[in-house]
Image: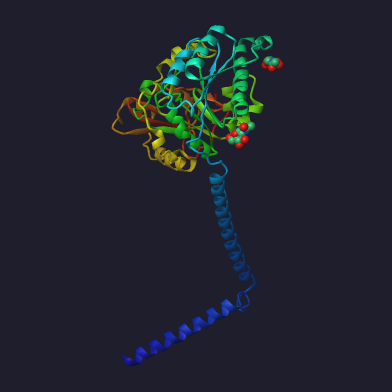
Amino acid sequence: MRRKHLVAIVVVIFLTWNFLMYYMLVSKNPGKLGSISVEDQLKILQGDIRHQLSHNSELLQHLQELDRKIHQTTTPVPYDANRFILPILLIACDRTTVSRSLDLLIKYRPNKNKFPIIVSQDCGHKPTADVIQRYVMEHDIKHIKHPNISDIHLPWPQKKFQGYYKLSRHYRWALNQVFHTFNHSAVVIVEDDLDISPDFYEYFSATFPILHQDPSLWCVSAWNDNGKLDMVSDDAELLYRSDFFPGLGWMMEKSTWLEIGPKWPDAFWDDWMRHPDQRRGRACIRPEICRTSTFGKKGVSKGLFYEKHLKFIKLNSKFVPFTQKDLSYLLKDKYDTYFTKLVKDTPEVTVAEAMSGHRSNMKALKILYSTKDEYKSTAKKLGIMDDFKAGVPRVAYNGVVSFMYRGQRIYLSPPPGWKGYNIKWS
Ligand SMILES: *[C@@H]1O[C@H](CO)[C@@H](O)[C@H](O)[C@H]1NC(C)=O
Ligand SMILES: *[C@@H]1O[C@H](CO)[C@@H](O)[C@H](O)[C@H]1NC(C)=O
């Protein structure tokens, strides 16, 4: 028994010594051991290089991450919330009902120095000018008049679009006034047929720092294209990112105007903004419940559309103290992680199942679409807007359209592995 023990100990010591000697030799003269063939040496070298490469690419990623963080925090000039001025630009023409818009803009305005109202009037309509002038006297608003009210010469097929051409020309001039003549650093643009919600100013004040900070955002809009009464939840706090430019009460920064102003189009400016050449992958913030609604039937584009759609839009009536809330969840990195997971974890059903109400116990359901026709047919069945602009469905973010259907949240979503919008979908 003792002898066996001793032999075992000696063997262990011998093996350990051998192992140590070998290890020291290899680590001192790597690759020089006669016993390792050239082929093996090459393999070792290859391994070393691969290791080094992966280390380098990790380092590079780390550096890029750092660079991005530095840019995120230093590129936008920090702004002083107390001294920040956010002008409201009201685009007017020949409707004396502009007073209805102005009444609400003044009623809900918390501070006239912080939110100066500029009414820009085109069309030279005297009765409308007189109405606006009353507000200049009583409420200290600014009234500017587009100096060029001449007709725009258009060849015959375009003649019927005169109104769109004039509107675009007016926008260009008015925005140049705001940013170049008055030197403001941001603007909220409304038109003369809009009502606003009580928290309209609060909403734009609170989202401005997010817009300013996140280069992947280029606007904040008051509008939800699927914001009809029965298609939104009661949660007035709910905000989203949207790849679709909604317009209808929207904010942008001067930097955006400096970029798009010089190439501003002669007509159809909103669709032009939705084109990838202008949008360049950027998103807007939009609410669940609209902060504006339109009351005008007359307008260059809104006649039929108003009767069919716009008049059913729900205007928010609850005041949400947005400036006291943390809205950083809307920043791209945080939002994308959260939203992707949210949609991924939502149970998938067919349109028929969603409509049958059999799954009404679930909070949310997901319906997939892979083709344009699938999207359109599903949208029609569920009653949401079924059109695309530059391949983007209204309100979509990363292809996903979120809305309520009979009290249940629905995500109309492309399948996993989505490659981006197809500009040919229209
Ligand atoms: C007025 O607008 C028309 C059409 O956009 C343009 O051709 C013309 O030069 C403008 N006139 C002035 C004085 O800016
Ligand atoms: C315009 O405003 C910026 C800051 O927003 C300021 O640096 C610049 O001096 C101003 N320019 C004029 C002409 O007032």
In this rendering, is residue 383 above or below 36?
above
Residue at horizontal 62%, vertical 67%? 45
Q: Where residue 313 sits in the image (x, y, percent)? A: 41, 19
**Is residue 41 found left or right of 84 in the rendered image?**
right
In this rendering, is residue 45 above or below 261?
below
Q: Quadrant of residue 382?
A: top left
* 117 vs 287, nearest the viewer: 117
Dividing the image into four equal quarters, which quarter contains ligand 1? top right
Q: Quadrant of residue 180?
A: top right
Q: Where residue 362 sits in the image (x, y, percent)? A: 31, 34
**Is residue 254 found left or right of 369 in the rendered image?**
right
Residue at the outermost left position? 361
Residue at the outermost front position? 137
* 51 vs 119, nearest the viewer: 119
Q: From this viewpoint, is residue 313 visible?
A: yes
**Is residue 115 found left or right of 183 in the rendered image?**
left
